[in-house]
Amino acid sequence: MTKRVLILPGDGIGPEIVAEAVKLLDALAGDGLDIELDEGLIGGSAYDAAGSPLPEATLAMAGEADAILLGAVGGPKWEPLDIAVRPEKGLLGLRSELGLFSNLRPAILYPQLASASSLRAEIVAGLDLMIVRELTGGIYFGQPRGVRTLDDGQRQGFNTLVYSENEIVRIVRSACDIAMKRGKRLCSVDKANVLECTELWREVASGVVADEYPEIELSHIYVDNAAMQLIKWPKQFDVIVTTNMFGDILSDAAAMLTGSIGMLPSASLNETGQGMYEPIHGSAPDIAGKGVANPLATILSVSMMLRYSLDEPDIADRVDAAVNAVLDQGLRTPDILSDGMTEVDCEAMGDAVVAAL
Ligand code: IPM
Ligand code: MG
């Protein structure tokens, strides 16, 4: 059956990097992959064109799609807007409307890029960890929220951290399913010494693992310690599961261990297996339109899409191998450039991956 893929280029470097991923999808379609591509608006460009960062038409197409490929949203142009219509709301709205609660953020160090990491090679060599971030709850979505005026006339900002048991259970299960296919070690990150909400998180996580995944070795650490351990000895981790905001922060730190945030894909899945795939880097307005962005995180997001939503693990392996091949050839966009390598632009990198495929 033909699978439908919705392409949402978004803002900043989004359109450039997504164009290279579409080139790859077209090549795969020409080679027998049964997919149909649609394109929609999201983020600041959607606000400019349609008055909303998440137009109804986009939401409708997203609901019909088997998988969504998203570039990036946001940029200084839209910062003055009210928070309710800022580009980020388009992304958050899509996550929430589609129930994409399980966000997989792998941090893998490609041996060819070991010298790009800010940590010594022995600390990061062979790094392969997976952060599973809860994506549709917690402080990002908790009510009440806002800015209110107190009796003394000063303003007070407030947000709410909430997790119900079933939200914790499903994200921990999702992380356990992944851990079972890897090293069977799961580390749950919380702040249970201070926040009641995450004290519950810890208790529920322990219960899920004890009752349903007896083979998994579960550990719990506080988020401040997790940040420290990630920098100190990242290879101690196999799978990390954590809340929406802690996962946001820790996944950026983990990304940097690998040398370039320009290499890392992500998947956001709901209970039906529908998924949204995006590079974890942002819209990089400073280099947008210059053609120098690294398309590999987006191309690797296509690989995750093939694996998790399109049920094509063999083709996913071919995409991964093609990325490895271009790195072996010494091709580098500026963000991962090092001595003796060949600098290429976004388009040339995309072409090289298609050729290697
Ligand atoms: C991410 C981003 C988003 C987030 C922003 C753009 C809303 O930082 O995907 O990590 O905070 O979730
Ligand atoms: Mg982030």
Image (cartoon, rainbow, N blue to C red):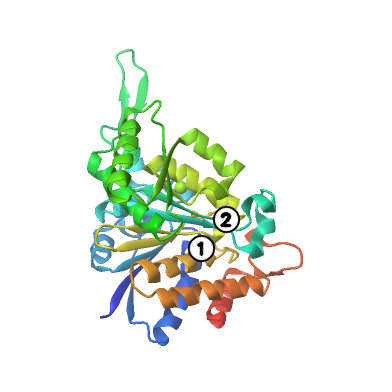
Tell me which numbered mark, 2 or 1, is placed earlier along the sequence.
2
Out of 7 and 95, give the one closest to the viewer: 95
Q: Is residue 350 visible?
A: no
Height in image: 287 above or below 237? Answer: below
Q: Is residue 293 visible?
A: yes
- Within 10 Å of disc 2 (Cα), the crowding (few <14, some 14-19, many 20+) is many
Q: Count all numbered tags in the image, as a single digit.
A: 2
Out of 69 and 153, give the one closest to the viewer: 69
Residue with the mark numbered 1: 297
Is label 2's Cβ within 8 Å of ligand 2?
Answer: no
Query: What residue appears at the point 29 percent right and 76 percent down from the top-left corner?
Result: 3
Query: What residue appears at the point 56 percent right and 37 percent down from the top-left corner?
Result: 228
Q: Residue furthest front?
A: 215
Tell me the SS state at disc 1. helix
In the rendering, at what x and y percent does residue 232 appear?
Answer: 61, 41
Mark 2 against mark 1, which lies toward the viewer?
A: 2
Residue 301 in the figure: left or right of residue 46: right
Height in image: 308 above or below 198? Answer: below
Q: CA distance from mark 2 to mark 1?
A: 17 Å
Residue 202: which quarter of the image? Answer: top left
In the rendering, at what x and y percent does residue 121 appear?
Answer: 68, 53
Kind of residue indicated by mark 1: Ala
In the rendering, at what x and y percent does residue 173 appear?
Answer: 31, 51
Residue 41 in the figure: left or right of residue 340: left
Out of 251 and 45, give the one closest to the viewer: 251
Residue with the mark numbered 2: 127
Kind of residue indicated by mark 2: Leu
- Within 10 Å of disc 1 (Cα), the crowding (few <14, some 14-19, many 20+) is many
Is label 1's Cβ within 8 Å of ligand 1?
Answer: no
In the rendering, at what x and y percent does residue 349 appear?
Answer: 59, 72
Please identify the quadrant where the N terminus is shown. Answer: bottom left
